[in-house]
Image: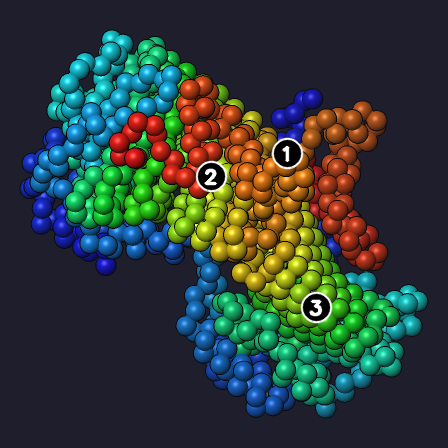
Amino acid sequence: MARETYSELFNANRGLIDRGAAPVLNDMRDHAAAMFLRHGFPDRRVEEYLHTDVADWFSTDWGMNLARVQIPVDTAEAFRCNVPNLTTQTHFLACDRYVHREGGQQLPDGVICGSLSDISRSNPELVSSCLGTLADMDRPGIAALNTMFVQDGFMIYVPDNTVVEKPVQLVSLMQSPVQMLAVRRILVVLGKGAGLRLLLCDHSAASVPCMSASVVECSVGQGAGLELYDLEETSLSNTRVTEYFVSQQRDSRVHADIVTLTNGRTRNTFHSVFKGPGAELELNGIAIMDGAQHVDNYTFVDHQSSDCSSRELFKYVLDGESTGSFAGKVLVRPHAQHTASVQTNRNICMTGTARMFTQPQLEIYADDVKCSHGATVGQLDEKALFYMQQRGIGLAEARMLLMLAFMSDVLDRISLDPLRSRLTALVELRLRHGQAHCDGCNICK
Amino acid sequence: MEKTGTDNSLVREISAEKYRYGFTTDVHTDVIERGLDEDTVRLISSRKGEPDWLLDFRLKAYRHWLTMKMPVWPHLTIPEIDYQNISYYADPTVKKEGPRDLGEIDPQVMKTFDKLGIPLEERLALSGGVAVDAVMDSVSVKTTFKKTLAEKGIIFCSMGEAVRNHPDLIRRYLGSVVGYRDNFFAALNSAVFSDGSFVYIPKGVRCPMELSTYFRINAQGTGQFERTLIVADDDSYVSYLEGCTAPMRDENQLHAAIVEIVVLDRAEVKYSTVQNWYPGDENGRGGVYNFVTKRGLLKGVDSRLSWTQVETGSAITWKYPSCVLQGDRSQGEFYSVALTNNFQQADTGTKMIHIGANTRSTIISKGISAGHSQNSYRGLVKVGENAEGARNYSQCDSLLLGDMCGAHTFPYMDVKNDTAVVEHEATTSKISEDQLFYLQQRGIPQEQAIGLIVNGYAKDVLNRLPMEFAVEAQRLLSVSLENTVG
């Protein structure tokens, strides 16, 4: 049903959509619409979506801001997502609209950063050579829908041999008086030997249920290094579907952390492909859930080239009636010899009503490889709890300490010191059943 | 080590030792016409002289099968199967003329089983030996030691005989673990199943000998659709072995079986399989399609079921021996070695469904892929809401020999209870060059060294097999790997 609704919506408003966006984006829509018609939205019959019915999520009557109505947002007041001791170059997305702010950004020469729509107009060749090259629309997912409706988003291009020292932060805020679906596109392009640290903070200040459908494409050039941190702190009424597509060239390094602290329903899909030898990927994830929260992380690491390594670690703590799902697939193609791949998923269920589904998968067609995966679902160690209680630590505190310890190895892998301590504090706050607020951030207060 | 040169030349020489059991027996076999419709189902039922309720069961299954499609989710490439081009019933015990005498076996059939190393004469069996139900094509040829077992109240006979002599038990338990709606091949089997074994161990009885069924496909153009049912009543114990072979043919033959096991209070069943159906030749021609549904219902408290399988044969294997852990404190185990070579494909594993409290399950799976084969482990561990204190440990390792094969792991873990502890570990790697070097250094040729390493790798599982089978399984592993250095 949802497929027809969105197709009709697209056909009926094609002119309106095109008017609000750059020609480069508009040129991609016809193909996307055809692909969308072919695949529709994935539901539970699709293996990768076994525990998340994305089609159902989209069946709600979401509004879309196709006419680009300006919803007033006071950026200075609303966005103070500070990480103490960490200065970042901050950019904002209000729902699906890039918010221009006063004050210049200090970026190295040649770096292009800002609204995807603006850059598509000013640098159409650059955008058209990268956009949509990684997001595969001919498969179940939301890439086709995103490409059909996308009007704006964020882009950063770092030319060859340029390192952006100061981390770049993109704060996406959902703020809408009506039920809304925001379609966002983020494009990250790193040239040879380039370096970038990117923080994606996902927030919601909406009083009504809202949904985001984002596609993030990261093209990482030869010898380049990308650190990507995605932190979701939205609200219980928020629905998020995000698809990452990462392509790594020879000897590149990608470190990605996907952290879900507060959310309603979340589905993250992370596709990664090694295009050249010697590349490394480290992919970590944390999900802390209670109530009726739902977090589904799906990762797919495609070893197309030899001598690459991937390391994945996902940890979930589930409380209340929350549902967690992790599915990770590692594909080692023929000739991708000397692949090293480790995938670990560990989960703690705190209540009888929390549910965890885990599904690590290995598909291997090369023989000289070292691949392993491990998954566990369990509880806190009774003996350790008893030990701490014996020494005068209250049960609640002991549980919290154990959970924090459980999460610590993921947190320890974050190389950005201020961010690591900030996230540790947020995780601790969250584990104490508080809301994981950023200090000084008005939307969180 | 001069790696590529030696390895590739050895890989090319794949499998010098031919499949040992690939001969055919020239015996008069009554084969019904190819094709499948309601009349075929009725014909099979009437040949076997079955009561109406069983015919109804078959017809229901057949009608349901018509509404189903072949599963596409396995990691297998299954060529289209023409179900109308298979004969669903072949009886090698029917004489050309005259009435059938149950006590008399065609000497050719007798010879066949002798050649397979399965003595059908009790005096030839080793002391304390193994009782055998020998099934050739669609019919049970002979069941040995029936009298000895009957003294203890144990029923061990062919399914056809059980339907005649123990209809109450069959009616009660047939389809109670694997219903005809369960899956495509279970529906097909329920419609056309021919023979198989039935075992009933009464309360408190410890079966004094190993029971076994040996399945042999002989006739051309047929499939084998046997059905095995084991019921272990309270406090009983039985160890059951299953073996199977088929002739070498260019055509693919279908084997779609069902094994159902019911384990009651405090009973224990050990089920061991050495699967050695014809795997096809080195170019992937011929071989048996082995699509089997095996499931045990651990109905009673403190019941135990252990599946041990060594899978070396079949062109395509699709098989997931499972345990439904319903009784409190019941325990399920699955130990498997699956070896694929040449163009074999295997998608095998288990399902452990924890329903009762404090249930435990262990999964140890060792996959070995060589040649151009594809070997997948697929397993489900499900912990229901009421399965307090459920515990599972899974370990599945894959070993790759050669760079043209694939090893895949698809575990599923669904946990709905917070007191459950579920652990899964998997590794995939090639054979350790250090170990190989060490053995070669000490004068052991490369091929033997690989055989040793593989046997060591599979030891956890092989150790679980009863003596007679363990020896056979070790030999099979070495033979299947011969000249397949990777």
Are circles 3 and 2 on residues that touch, CB within 8 Å?
no
Are circles 1 and 2 on residues that touch, CB within 8 Å?
no
Measure the C-alpha gap from mark 3 to mark 2: 40 Å
Dot label at residue B301: 3
- Which chain does tag 2 point to? A
- Residue B189 at x, y = what percent? 56, 72
Residue type (three-letter) at the residue carrying disc 3: Val
| Quarter the N terminus of chain A occupies | bottom left
Measure the C-alpha gap from mark 1 to mark 2: 46 Å
| Quarter the C terminus of chain A occupies | top left
- Residue A126 at x, y = what percent? 21, 21
Residue type (three-letter) at the residue carrying disc 2: Arg
Of discs 3 and 2, which sits in the foreground?
A: 2
Question: Which mark is first along the chain, 1 or 3?
Answer: 3
> Where, by quadrant of the figure, is residue A439 drawn?
top left
Q: Residue at x 57, y 79 (%)?
A: B32
**Discs 3 and 2 carry the same chain letter:** no
Mark 2 lies on residue = A432
- Residue A149 at x, y = what percent? 18, 41
Q: Say few, some or many: other residues with alpha carbon within 10 Å of mark 1 (under 14 / 14 to 19 / 20 or more).
A: many
Dot label at residue B430: 1
